[in-house]
Amino acid sequence: MPRRRSPIRRLALLAAGIVIGAALMSEVRGSADADGSAARVVIPPGASMRAAADSLAAHDIIGSTRLFRWYASFRGNARAIKPGTYLLPPGAGYATVLDALVNGKGIMTTVVIPEGFDLRDITPALAKALNVPEDSVRAAVTDTAWINQLAVPVPSLEGYLFPATYAFPEGTTAREAVNAMIERFLDAWKPEWDARLQALSITRHDALAMASIVEKEARKPEERPIISAVYWNRVKAGMLLQADPTVQYALPKHVGRVLYKDLEVESKYNTYKHTGLPPGPIASPGAASIEAALSPADVPYLFFVARADGSHQFTRTFEEHTRAIAQIRSAARATSPQSSR
């Protein structure tokens, strides 16, 4: 025979229901932000309902952490929340918010696009994160609307998808993701960089092409402006850039090291065969490399060669360059395990 609740317990439950109901109504009616913008809330794995409620309150998603916890307990969902990064609108209401946390609705997908990634890297990364076909990403990065708006003289948006960490809500399309990445690029572009374009008599596309080469070549942050200067000096002198990363870009697939046979690849991006800048960027440069491309160091160097630690030896003449190569190779042989035999 079922147990009967006492009148006092029934009144207590009724009162709790009234309080929670009133709280729900106030949440629905009154606490949305003026601009209606959603907030990004991270619920880490193993987070308690108290921690989740504190985070929600800090982002103005809920008004009262205590009432929200009571409501979650009343619903029997206090321990059922799913971790993740959520995009939630302020004032959505306790029921909507709890439903999102319990069922994983509104979870964001995070994708990291590092500096130096090109479209061959970005395309599969975006497709996997968004759970869309790679062809849809390829279509988005060849969108003629953006290409025309940005005055891009090549058939893709290579170099314009800004490297950063992105969080996309479930259901984001490839085109929406690419739009967000281009918007991030436009936001990152500094007004003073336009003045530098005029001072150098180059276009933004030229700057990004140079910045992408600097991004791929530099291992030491402090060397970026010097590497930029070397390549700009070569452009001014009418010399071949002879930048290995452009050859790697021209090859059908990525290679870890450029071989002599690779230098024969027929492509306008092969700067061992064609003078001047390549037709466009060869990767997505970060802000530091863009800055370096627009503010090269005031140095007379025309050559550089990499040392074992990733730094470079910079020289002015081909004779100095040849000696630097010999010295670096000699030092490498002296420190290799075979040299002690």
Image (tube, grey):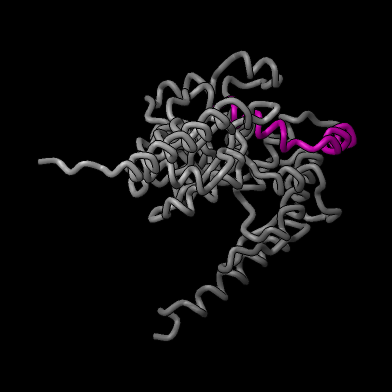
Q: Main secondary structure of the magenta part?
A: helix
Quadrant of the rendered image containing residue 109 = top left
Q: Residue 180 lies in magenta, yes or no?
A: yes
Q: Which residues are the magenta region?
A: 178-200
Residue 73 or residue 235, whichever sits in front: 73
Residue 340 or residue 173, whichever sits in front: 173
If the image is split into quadrants, where does the N terminus sit? Answer: top left
If the image is split into quadrants, where does the C terminus sit? Answer: bottom left
- Taking the spot 77% from the left edge, 38% from the top edge, the residue there is 238
Q: Please indicate, yes or no, whether residue 265 appears anywhere in the rendered image.
A: no
Q: In the drawing, does residue 312 fall left or right of residue 131?
A: right
Residue 314 or residue 15, whichever sits in front: 15
- How many marks overall? 0
Q: Relative to residue 223, is residue 212 depicted above or below?
A: above
- Taking the spot 66% from the left edge, 61% from the top edge, the residue there is 220
Residue 145 drawn at (x, y percent): 62, 14
Residue 182 drawn at (x, y percent): 63, 29
Q: In the drawing, does residue 232 fall left or right of residue 240?
A: right
Name the outermost residue toward the front: 7
- Taking the spot 41% from the left edge, 79% from the top edge, the residue there is 338
Q: Residue 314 lies in magenta, yes or no?
A: no
- Taking the spot 54% from the left edge, 48% from the top edge, the residue there is 55
Q: Relative to residue 201, is residue 66 depicted above or below?
A: below
